[in-house]
Amino acid sequence: MFYPLAGQIQENSFIDCNDSGVEFVEAQVHARLSDVIREPNMAELNKFLAVNPTGVGIATLLAVQINFFDCGGIAIGVCLSHKIADGTSLVAFINAWAATCRGEVKIRQPYFDLAHLFPPRDLSGFSFTPNDGITKEKIMTKRFIFDKEKLAMLKKEAAAASGDGSQVKNPTRVEAVSAFIWKKFMEVAKNKMDVKKMYVAVHAVNLRPRTSPPLSEQAFGNCWRPSFAFISTSGDEKNGCPNVLPVLRSSISKINSDYIKQVQNGEYLNHLSKSKDMFMKGDIELCNFSSWSRFPVYEVDYGWGRPCWVCTTTLPFKNVVILMSTPCGDGIEAWVNMLEEDISAFRS
């Protein structure tokens, strides 16, 4: 079904569907799975993966490592190249794989027709490279858990934060957590006297439900685009904290049918290139969010039950936040990648 994953990347521009296969590793872990889940060591999680997830120049599209623990527990580490697919497609593949293991007959089939909607473009004039954003600075990853009660409090605070008539009365849990974390990043920058002209929050937005008509989640590929929320350091602030929630919601709402038309005709590339040049000048403090909270990762069942915990790993990118659902489904885990020197200030 997912035959392109057995191919190889050629010239960093296309996939040769040569059926060369995927990387599959079995590993014995001399530990108890419960200990890893109870107190996850962020620096150790990459050992459960078959390849370095941010390795540049790796031709393999899919790498899987099955980890067998001494207690009998099993952890499956999956790496899928972002050059060919996004998180939605990754989870679709994993669920289809699990359904096959269970012996299911009716499995939702992927389709690979996104190029008809979003034709390939000549990127020779653009300076995008696979390692854009990777920093050599010391990055640490911290996991912050927002349970149901904490989320309710954050949503209430976020809804009441603005006093200019632009209140968001019904913030989602992702909006509330994103606003909270973004303001934390702003506070860290200000405490360091790191003067910036602009603070920018970037959200990865799935385009599938925003096309007309909406696309199926089985549409395989990179069907997402970033939204950009801007806060000027010269803007009005309340008690030193800007009202970020309406700005966040407005930026995401702009990823609509009109924007998708720009993506289809290639106009967005010029805007993206200008944005990158602006970011590289250093006058902007970026905070990048990717929400996996709606991915059906806790529905994955290979035949021995659903997972007790699903997680990501550390990333060598500054100010990158991955939002995931908690196992019970009513909380959010925020995996925050930031400079080591900023962690203590962020937690205070």
Image (spheres, grey):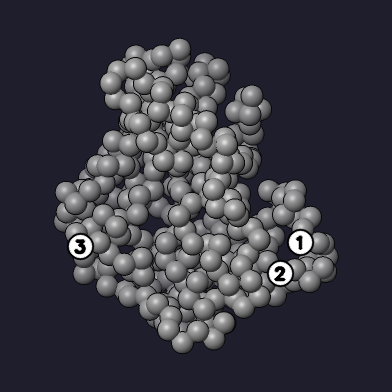
Specify few, some or many for label 2: CA neighbours under 10 Å numbering under 14, 14-19, or 20 or more: some
Disc on the earlier residue, 1 or 2? 1
**Residues under labels 3 and 1: Cα distance?**
44 Å
Looking at the image, residue 329 lies above or below residue 66: above
Kind of residue indicated by mark 3: Pro
Kind of residue indicated by mark 2: Ile
Q: Which residue has dot 1 on it? A: 33
Q: Secondary structure at mark 3?
A: loop
Q: Which mark is residue 213?
A: 3
Kind of residue indicated by mark 1: Leu
- Look at 22% across and 48% down and name the residue there: 256
Q: How many marks?
A: 3
Q: Secondary structure at mark 1?
A: helix
Disc on the earlier residue, 3 or 2? 2
Residue 234 visible in the picture: no
Looking at the image, residue 6 lies above or below residue 80: below
- Look at 32% across and 75% down and name the residue there: 111
Closer to the camera, 163 or 1? Answer: 163
The image quarter containing residue 140 is top right
Q: Secondary structure at mark 2?
A: strand
Circles 1 and 2: CB atoms closer than 8 Å = yes
**Residues under labels 1 and 2: Cα distance?**
7 Å
